[in-house]
């Protein structure tokens, strides 16, 4: 019977995770026992953490409060969920815990009612969080990480084979649109968390991190005003000695686009960037393209830079009318095409190799 009940609980957890796609779908209780929908935090960057008041990691409250005070005005919130599952290091009522935290660390960020984060009685929010970001392991090159790994492995040799929360002060970073971005074990340096968080809190950095190459678009032309804003961002890119050696052609004529759509991702609009045939101006044009792509991202548009269609556009007879319409200045060549439109896909970020960056100190 117990096995059947456990299987039913597990099945219900899976169904819950399937139905809920962001942290905004969950309701929690605050320190007064009142229901709070996490949808109230839409548009904010969140750090969700399970805490304890009698843990070796408890002094992290001081670091967390410093982080909160530094970025709260920029739309950052810490959501604190005390949990007594790890060494029974969060005893007492939520009121007693809150009094301890305010008296010893003067915390200002919201604390919620005590919950469980693992097992049959775990809060659905944590079922979701763990499903999104499983356990990635402790850094055993770090003394604290090695200590945690040794302690937990003595208790269970296979402790690292599941997504369970391993100890107090595990943290989850949540984007402004409710996605679980990253999980941090309690031994992670706060400075590393802050670096990741800045990419979300800072609007320029978050825009850069959110941009993806879009290859599927809605059948909806971009408004002229938005195309003008994108072009303005482009021509404000730096160029050698401010020569601005580029020519930009933005195609809104749908009849012209009909002849080349198959070669250009079926985008509702195209931006053609030209540069002098002689000389080295590719860098200037590239910087312009990056400006335009980031501007488009900030306006809710998607882009994809393409060089592949250039041969077709410049040599195929079917594209002659299109090419002639660009009125490319004498001595210039078509360098690349930027497809632009409203996205009809949400591609995931591709891995980046941070080891390619070296700091010379």
Image (spheres, grey):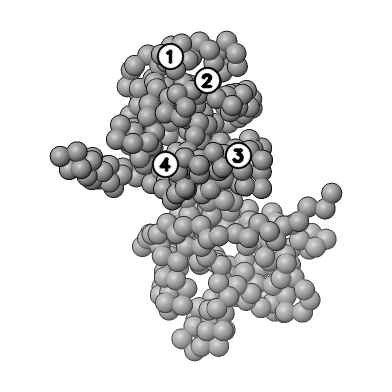
Asked whether 143 or 335 is in front, the reply is: 143
Q: Residues within 10 Å of mark 4 (few under 14, many from 20)?
A: some
Which residue is found at the position 38% from the left and 26% from the top? 115
Give me the C-alpha separation between circle 2 and circle 3: 20 Å
**Label 1 element class:** loop
Give me the C-alpha separation between circle 2 and circle 1: 10 Å
**Label 4 element class:** loop
Q: Are marks 2 and 1 in contact (CB under 8 Å)?
A: yes
Q: Which residue is mark 3?
A: 147
Label ID, residue 164: 4
Give me the C-alpha separation between circle 4 and circle 1: 24 Å
> Which residue is situated farthest in the front direction here?
154
Q: Which residue is mark 1?
A: 92
Marked residue nearer the N-terminal end (4 or 3): 3
Give me the C-alpha separation between circle 2 and circle 4: 21 Å
Label ID, residue 53: 2
């Amino acid at each position: 019977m117990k096995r059947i009940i456990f299987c039913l609980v597990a099945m219900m957890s899976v169904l819950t995770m399937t139905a809920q796609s962001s942290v905004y779908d969950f309701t929690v209780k605050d320190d007064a026992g009142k229901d709070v929908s996490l949808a109230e935090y839409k548009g904010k960057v969140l750090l969700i953490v399970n805490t304890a008041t009698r843990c070796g990691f408890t002094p992290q409250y001081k670091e967390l409060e410093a982080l909160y005070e530094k970025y709260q005005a920029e739309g950052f919130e810490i959501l604190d969920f005390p949990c007594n599952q790890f060494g029974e290091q969060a005893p007492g009522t939520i009121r007693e815990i809150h009094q301890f935290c305010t008296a010893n660390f003067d915390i200002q960020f919201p604390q919620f009612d005590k919950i469980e984060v693992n097992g049959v009685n775990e809060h659905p929010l944590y079922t979701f969080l763990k499903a999104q970001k499983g356990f990635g392991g402790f850094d055993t090159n770090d003394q604290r990480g090695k200590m945690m790994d040794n302690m937990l492995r003595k208790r269970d040799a296979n402790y690292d084979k599941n997504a369970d929360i391993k100890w107090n002060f595990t943290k989850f970073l949540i984007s402004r649109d409710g996605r679980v971005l990253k999980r941090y074990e309690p031994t992670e340096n706060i400075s590393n968390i802050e670096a990741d968080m800045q990419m979300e809190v800072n609007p320029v950095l978050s825009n850069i991190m959110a941009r993806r190459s879009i290859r599927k678009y809605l059948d909806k032309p971009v408004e002229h005003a938005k195309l003008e804003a994108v072009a303005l961002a482009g021509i404000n890119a730096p160029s050698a000695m401010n020569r601005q050696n580029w020519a930009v052609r933005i195609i809104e004529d749908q009849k012209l686009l009909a002849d080349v759509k198959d070669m250009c991702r079926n985008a509702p609009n195209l931006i053609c960037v030209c540069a002098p045939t002689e000389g080295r101006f590719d860098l200037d044009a590239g910087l312009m393209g990056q400006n335009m792509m980031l501007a488009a991202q900030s306006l809710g548009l998607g882009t994809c830079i393409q060089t592949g269609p250039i041969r077709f556009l410049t040599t195929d007879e079917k594209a002659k009318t299109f090419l002639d319409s660009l009125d490319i200045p004498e001595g210039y060549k078509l360098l690349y095409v930027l497809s632009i439109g409203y996205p009809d896909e949400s591609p995931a970020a591709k891995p980046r190799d941070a080891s390619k960056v070296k700091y010379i100190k």
